Amino acid sequence: MRTDPALLRDLRAAVGDDAVLVSAEACAPYECDALTAQRRVPGIVVLPRSGEQVMGVLRACRRHSTPVVARGAGTGLSGGALPVEGGVLLVLARLDRVLEVDPGRRLARVEPGVTNLEISNVAAPHGLYYAPDPSSQVACTIGGNVAENSGGVHCLKHGLTVHNLLEVRVATIEGEWLTLGSTAGDAPGLPLLALLTGSEGMLGVVTEVTVRLKPVPERVELLMASFDEVRRCADAVGRIIASGIVPAGLEMMDAPALRAAEAFARCGYPQDAAALLLCELDGLAQDVEAELAIASEVLERSGATGLRVARDAAERQRMWSGRKSAFPAVGRLAPDYFCMDGTIPRRNLADVLDGIAALSREAGLPVANVFHAGDGNLHPLILFDAGRTGEVERAERLGAEILELCVAAGGTVTGEHGVGVEKLGPMCSQFGAGEIEAFHAVKRVFDPDGLLNPGKAIPTLARCADYGAMRVHGGKLPFPQLPRF
Ligand SMILES: Cc1cc2nc3c(=O)[nH]c(=O)nc-3n(C[C@H](O)[C@H](O)[C@H](O)COP(=O)(O)OP(=O)(O)OC[C@H]3O[C@@H](n4cnc5c(N)ncnc54)[C@H](O)[C@@H]3O)c2cc1C
């Protein structure tokens, strides 16, 4: 494709010659995010170093009516940062400065390319940390976290990204600066910070983020409970929450996932278990002591066949290492895998896991489950071989059926990985035409010409008609074989 010379001139004026890539070779590393099944080599990649340069890029794209896609580290699992035809890929990774750590006000102000883990690292000398902890935290950027409203193992108690943001600075495609939220404790006006969080780069480009920091807890305990039946393990999740405890993290793995994690990380998981629960408690020493006793009793009464409390911080870290590396660990079991992301009410965990097992058998594709059980946020990992004819399509079909199952169980088609391009179809089962039109109307307010990350996150009504399903919830199930809830 021929690149518009006037656009190139304006982009080079905005960021400098060396920060504009156009050769296919230089642009190839940006062809996909972690949803590797979808790829498109971008025609132009720009690598600005400051917010002002980002604004310059957006103004140039607007002037030339060119679509633009923001990208952080490209660890997204739903194709949100997939380049669009004829568009510019705006990579924020060079905006990686920590601008301020204020222990008095317990906040950090950073540029969007700073990694999630780096924020906790710079806060650590002050006894503080940034709570949301996606398993990709070594690599993913805070800008990407804001755009996806990312979660993590410790979000059950400490909240998602949206609950830990104070203020963001945003460049709009209209060439304006917005400051959303406030560091003052209350932000008057409409809650646009919440609207922007999770908007997948479709409303504006985040150029600065101020996050809330929390004190490192006085005491932390990690319980590992093993079960000889998946259903018992799933039921224990609801019982722990019903006991009044809010664990910092409550994570579940089924047999394929825990065995893969053990083989990968040597983290001490019992190989003969059908399912495993990791339950972390944090807070004041005396509270944690009391909660540990309650959680242990609930797990025993729920039929745990093994119960172990991590001896010290090193063992705790080892136990978590398996969970945190479970995606790449499962990834070694097959040439390819899709990581699905649906959310369901906790009370339906056991039934939905049974339903997923049935769908997996029917499709002839193995599924491993490793997920944020306390939040009801499932991550079924579908294993397949893209080299075999028709297997990608079968895996995609199975993924869609699993998400339909989540919706039928009163849940949603995404928990924390966003919609991107991957879940455009399943969005049609979740929402009716009215809601989808409302999403488009909000997008038009920020981006009247539809230039920011077009074609992502919100399906068109025509696409929904093609998909053949709208609003399963309380309506017709497109897959009659699925159980009704
Ligand atoms: C192994 C693995 C484990 C993971 N574990 C988790 C997990 O536990 N929890 C979780 O929530 N996610 C998880 N993820 C998904 C992913 O890491 C998160 O979605 C993360 O927030 C993406 O950040 P990123 O910097 O890589 O963003 P990218 O993938 O580059 O982009 C993601 C989206 O954000 C937009 N975007 C990026 N930067 C900006 C910006 N500055 N302004 C506006 N829009 C922007 C992009 O356009 C795109 O739509 C995991 C991914 C992998 C590969």
Image (cartoon, rainbow, N blue to C red):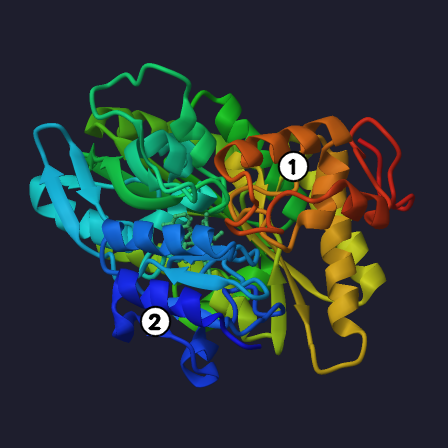
Q: Which residue is mark 2?
A: 20
Q: Residue at x 43, y 36 (%)?
A: 197
Which residue in the rendered view is the most extreme toward the front? 6
Q: Residue at x 29, y 70 (%)?
A: 19
Q: How many marks?
A: 2
Residue 475, x across and y down, in percent: 85, 29
* Quadrant position of the C terminus in the picture: top right
Q: Which mark is residue 234?
A: none
The amino acid beneath tag 2 is Val
Q: Are marks 1 and 2 in contact (CB under 8 Å)?
A: no
Horizontal relation, residue 169 to residue 230: left or right: left
Residue 382, x across and y down, in percent: 66, 63
Query: Against 59, is 28 above or below?
Result: below
Single out the mark in the foreground, 1 or 2.
2
Residue 10, x across and y down, in percent: 35, 63
The amino acid beneath tag 1 is Thr
Question: Crowding at label 1, few (<14), some or many (≥20) Cα neighbours within 10 Å?
Answer: many
Question: Crowding at label 2, few (<14), some or many (≥20) Cα neighbours within 10 Å?
Answer: many
| Of pointers 1 and 2, the one earlier in the residue sequence | 2
Residue 429, x across and y down, in percent: 76, 39
Query: Against 333, is 360 above or below?
Result: above
Q: Which residue is mark 1?
A: 412
